[in-house]
Image (tube, grey):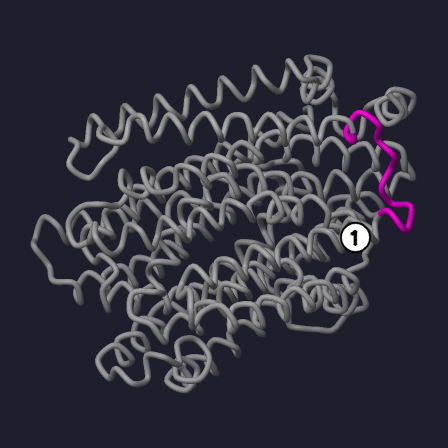
Amino acid sequence: MSLVKKFATVASGTLMSRALGFGREMLMAAALGTGPVADAFNAAFQFPNTFRRLFAEGAFNAAFVPLFAKEIETHGTEGAKRFSEEVFGVLFTALLALTIVMELSMPLIVRYLVAPGFADTPGKFETTVRLATIMFPYLICMSLGAMMAGMLNSLRRYFAAAVAPVFLNIILIGVLAYAWYHGLDARAVGFGLSWGVLAAGLVQLAIVWVAVRHAGISIGFRRPKMTPSVKRLLILALPAAITGGITQINQLIGTAIASAQDSAVSSLAYADRIYQLPLGVVGVAVAIVLLPELSRALKSGNLIEAANLQNRSVEFTLFMTLPAAAALWVMSEPIVRLVYERGAFAANHSTPTVAAILAIFGLGLPAFVLIKAFTPGYFAREDTRTPMMFAAISVAVNVATALTLFPSMGAPGIAVASAVAGWVNALMLLAVLIRRGHWGRDVPLLKRIPRLVLSAAVMGAVLYFAEHWLAVRLGPGSPLVVKATTLLSLVAGGALLYFITAFATGGADFGMIRRNVQRGSAKAAPSQAKADLDE
């Protein structure tokens, strides 16, 4: 299967999840707006979600996958099964202990870490504590599920792990539909959503567990034991967890700072949901597929193919995310108005704030995606310390910038800090890969980047003037159908213009598309891979 086909397999499941996520957020915005319950739910959900990214997706897609792939290559399926059982025993025990401690400490955690600004609002504070207490066990389900998803990705079975997150949105949409039908108040909706999150975690874990069994590996529980393989995993996992979850760490910091201002937490969450669509569909797909493929290429000593995999991934991410970034920057307000502006979501206050945040997130989008393309170059070589150092610098930049800008800009200042930190992190990762000789010289890629930037800029300029020309049709007084058809027509026209400009300027060509679509991952002839690098 080609690299792009694997990207598409993962992206299809992610796209399904993100599309349903839009539906969920639309219903949530209508039911809760940016009021106190919305702030409480988003702050409470951010906490277990951050831990999930730190200890599950970040750590295991970065540390577990290369080691599991090595076990498959050296000891076959039986060795990989033994290793996964050893890890499962240690992971489950550690997660259970962590959950008990966190549940008992939740009031202190919310007061001093998650949302210190809520402490002065008693009802809001207690609600956040209770919602976080309900949702935190979600971490156990998702961490164990992430481990099994890593196994499936290493076995090149991508779809089950990609489609499992869809059920979180299906369940939460069901909760919101039930709440709407029965006319439940905001507080009841918040609690219903929290129990829905926990139920979704159990469903997602069941899906990947069945898929792993179907792939021929049955995981049994072993008494926790620090074997050499587990010790090696933990050495790699701690820095990998921090690095892989850097975006979520920055979001958690932003949530804590934003809690000092009413509606800021929920405004950030609503904007985050929209920009997560291109980030998830492209960035997550690239990160999930690239790491095991790169690990296999390096383990087999195929350095040319490894370099080529990295270059083609960056080529693909830039080709897809630059126009998305330009569209989010110039069309943020019509997008927010179409997606959220109804019910309790106030047009005069909520829309401009969320739109400003979304536009700034758009500028950071290429950086967030490039981080996911660059970090496998370190993780596949079992170097998790260097990205961790860069992640720490990124966090420091984020905190300093957010604290500086928040008093004057409010929630958009936190978005600026996140975007700046993302670009700092991405540039540091690239610079060290080049310095170490782990980034192959790719003349076509270097030529295409400025042309792709130009194509995205042309598209953005045209969309900017078209949006102002069609302001009445996109305005708050326009019917929903008119707004939707007008916005979708602009998006389709902008995409067509981008592709035409990209091909006309040489930013893209059919040879590039053909190479990415036809390339069998880790199976391309070394001579062809070298030709791609030197072309």
**Lateral position of residue 436 relative to residue 9, left or right:** right
User: Does the magenta portion include 445?
Assistant: yes
User: Does the magenta portion include 149?
Assistant: no
Residue pointed to by mark 1: 378
Q: Residue at x 75, y 67 (%)?
A: 389
Label 1: how many residues lie within 10 Å, few (<14), some (14-19) or many (20+)? Answer: many
Query: Quadrant of the rendered structure where residue 395 is?
Result: bottom right
Q: Residue at x 29, y 85 (%)?
A: 120
Q: Residue at x 29, y 70 (%)?
A: 262
Look at the image and give the residue range highlighted in magenta. 434-446
Mark 1 lies on a secondary structure that is helix
Note whether 533 is above or below 191 in the view shown.
above
Task: Estimate the x, y position of residue 405 in percent, counting from the top left.
Answer: 49, 68
Task: Estimate the x, y position of residue 338 in percent, counting from the top left.
Answer: 27, 38
Q: Nearer the viewer, residue 81 or 166?
A: 166
Task: Estimate the x, y position of residue 79 in percent, counting from the top left.
Answer: 77, 51
Q: Nearer the viewer, residue 270 or 448?
A: 448
Q: Nearer the viewer, residue 125 or 107?
A: 125
Task: Estimate the x, y position of residue 420 in percent, counting from the top left.
Answer: 60, 57
**Lateral position of residue 196 relative to residue 87, left or right:** left
Note whether 85 is above or below 363 in the view shown.
below
Note whether 482 is above or below 274 in the view shown.
above
**Number of marks in the image?**
1
Note whether 91 is above or below 307 in the view shown.
below
Quarter in which the C terminus is drawn: top right
Quarter in which the N terminus is drawn: top right
Mark 1 is on which residue type? Tyr
